[in-house]
Image (spheres, grey):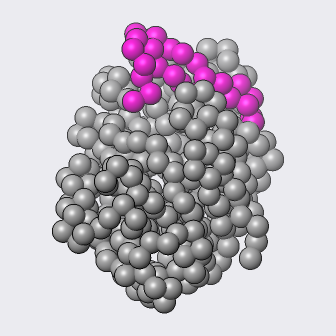
Amino acid sequence: MREAVEVKASRSYPVRIEKGLLDQAGELIRERTDAKRACIVTGEHVVKLYGERLQRSLEQTGFQVLRFIHHSGEQHKTLETYGELLGLLARSGMTRSDLLVSLGGGVTGDLTGFAAATWQRGVDFVQIPTSLLAMVDSSVGGKTAVNLPEGKNLVGSFWQPILVLCDPALLGSLPIEELRCGSAEEFKCGVLRDEGLFDALSKNPALASSEDVIRRCVQIKRDLVEEDEFDRGSRRLLNLGHSFGHAVEVCSGYEILHGQAVAIGMAMIARAAAEKGICAPETAEKICAGIRALSLPTETEIPGETLLKALLRDKKRSGDTMNLIVPETIGSCRVEKVPVEELGDWLRLGGAR
């Protein structure tokens, strides 16, 4: 088995990245916990693909298993779904010594993590991401949340898992658009801290689902989480493309997928940064060209005024300013504190209509 990426945060844990891990999940989880019971949290599509295999693996190592199956899609990552999950845990007599296991993409991982953080003031949970986006981003770092009608991820907590199992063999079931969404987060890592990764993905998008690229992205995220677990400093860099991107996602009613929205957000902030003189015009163009090479969008038809209203409700706003992450060169970005009254101008310079 390949060496795990170790995340040393308030709770330290390994991120294992290797084909075949799903069928070893019970054994690997048992090494990390003495829990007797495990609740698998998964979506209605993923459970049909992988639910029985995970349950069998858990039961073979002595776990009593129950399941919570939620509707798929970001629009169902809500307080209502969260409440339904907690209700199941209560009716089933789940205790603080039991375990939650997330099997799915970012929606499932966020929901499971938030429930784990709050059920009886905190229980252990494991991440088994089934999407590329979740493998390289949301399964690592301990951010958990659900959405409100007013905005994305407005209710949440920091709660680290005890183990993350990334099995790239599971990516074979993903539609191409979901793979592209994951590549947006990988591309973001390249813009942030690795010009070589940026160039590799721009030239060969097929590398996105490779173990080596997944591992490198997890390492980059690990480094930023260890520097700033609670998102008060350098970890904010991981929000590159997300402020504008979340506004695009919310305003589309989640019709635009998260990775697509992040790609649009990265392109917009790069264009605005070039107009502001923060990065060279050719840097912005390289970023936009790389996004297009990954078959991801760089523009939105959503009006700037509509985006601005959503942006003002974003959790990255702090009083009268918002932290925007802007590129300086490929591989180097910075946090820019922008007065909220200037956000409309940033959107306009980024290409909002």
Question: Split into 4 quadrants, where in the image is the N terminus?
Answer: bottom right
**Whether residue 281 is situated above or below residue 163 in the rendered picture:** above
Q: Is residue 152 visible?
A: no
Q: Residue at x 40, y 11 (%)?
A: 320
Q: Residue at x 37, y 42 (%)?
A: 156
Quarter of image, res 231: top right
Left or right: 90 with respect to 124?
left
Between residue 28 and residue 317, name the one nearer to us: 28
Residue 112, image x, y percentages: 38, 58
Q: Please provide the residue range marked out in magenta.
A: 315-343
Q: Is residue 317 visible?
A: yes
Residue 87, image x, y percentages: 19, 62
Left or right: 345 with respect to 291?
left
* Residue located farthest toward the right when viewing the structure as drawn: 196
Between residue 114 and residue 130, name the one nearer to us: 114
Q: Residue at x 78, y 42 (%)?
A: 195
Q: Residue at x 52, y 69 (%)?
A: 33
Question: Split into 4 quadrants, where in the image is the C terminus?
Answer: top left
- Does 116 lie within the magenta span? no
> For the stretch drawn in magenta, what is the main secondary structure?
strand
Residue 215, image x, y percentages: 71, 59
- Does 333 lie within the magenta span? yes
